[in-house]
Amino acid sequence: MTTTSPEENPRFHRLANVFPLLGEAEFAELVKDIRANGQMDPIVMFEGLILDGRNRYLAIEEINKDLPVAERMPHTEIKFDQKWPGRDPADYVWSHNVVRRHLSQGQIDFAAQALEELGWGGKPGNRNAAKSKTEMQPGTTDEPKTRKVIAKETGATVRGMAKAAKVRKRATPKVQKAVRDGDLTLNAADRIADLPPEEQEEVMADSKPADAVTRRETLKTKQSPARKVNPVLSMKGHMTGHQSGIRDVVLINKFWTDNKDKIKELDGDDLRSFVKDLEESRRAASQLLTLLSEVLVPEWTLPGKQPALLSTALNKIDLAAKNGEGTEEGK
């Protein structure tokens, strides 16, 4: 199989290159099948380039490379806009790759973000709609799909797509290719993208890049002098569960109160998840207080008084002790 990356092959449409090519073993099986049975499915062309069927094209090229011209197998092709007039080519590419390929969640997020970047669903010529050089086809809209819409329609995640956008912007081509091909998780790539390009190359040269970036992060943490904490970063840590427990909640509440002017700088999706977590914590705490009340309040209640909350009972007991009063048991 050719070692040329999809982006370097001038025959491949950029929409098709959102997805990885077959691995060596799968490609060898495809070559074997086409050699024995011929090309069963046509190659789909769009704007003069291969929209679907890159692997079939490469397999036929592999079969033909040592054959005389007269014996070579021809490529069977169809034109996308003639076969499916009005259909969005990005929708076609997505349905013909994700459904029939075993992609990880990170690969799905990475591919979805790539199509977002190409203006999925938008009018050609729009600033964000680079998917076509032709006039807008019937059925398309003026504006590209939003990230939330793409995530909902594809099974991608908004947070994963955000990481994918960061990786595309800051990571080296080798890191990006590894994510697309499924050789590196999106989470690991997100961390590698924080490194300078030369360090990214060194990490990717390691047999286990994820472990390599962890070692670098640990080393930098040990070597870094103490510095003032960025409130926004701390608040993000609170929302993603890096801290837990009753004492932490008290401290987090004070921290957020002291930095309430930073709340609007936080990611909306992270905030929604955090609020849901707080609601769950509040329900759990309420249930626990109810349980403790059922068990302890009868023993801690002052004569003739039934507090609404366990904390009220405790306050009254403490107050009674301070004033020299006592409960029935203490008399």
Image (cartoon, rainbow, N blue to C red):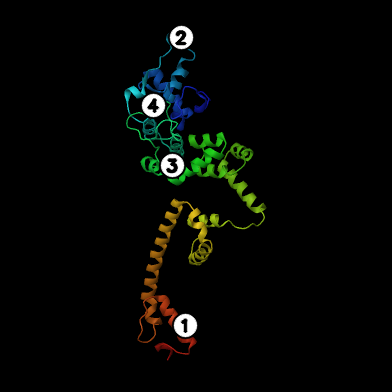
Q: Which residue is mark 1?
A: 318
Q: Nearer the viewer, mark 4 or mark 3?
A: 4
Asked if marks 4 and 2 touch (Cβ < 8 Å), the reply is no
Quadrant in which residue 13 is drawn: top left
The amino acid on which the numbered mark 2 sits, given as a three-letter code, is: Val
Tag 3, which secondary structure? helix
Question: Which badge, 3 or 1, is on the more N-terminal residue?
Answer: 3
Q: Which residue is mark 2?
A: 69
Count of number-bearing discs: 4
Spatial distance from mark 4 to mark 2, Cα to Cα?
38 Å
Q: Which residue is mark 3?
A: 105
Tag 4, which secondary structure? loop
Residue at 39% from the left image edge and 77% from the top image edge: 296
The amino acid on which the numbered mark 1 sits, given as a three-letter code, is: Asp
Residue at 48% from the left image edge and 56% from the top image edge: 239
Q: Which residue is mark 4?
A: 135
Residue in front for this viewpoint, 25 or 43:
43
The spot of residue 215 in percent (x, y) is 61, 47
The spot of residue 235 in percent (x, y) is 52, 57
Mark number, residue 171: none
Tag 2, which secondary structure? helix
Residue in front for this viewpoint, 101 or 29:
101
Q: Nearer the viewer, mark 4 or mark 2?
A: 4
Q: Residue furthest top?
A: 70
The amino acid on which the numbered mark 4 sits, given as a three-letter code, is: Glu
Question: Which badge, 4 or 3, is on the more N-terminal residue?
Answer: 3
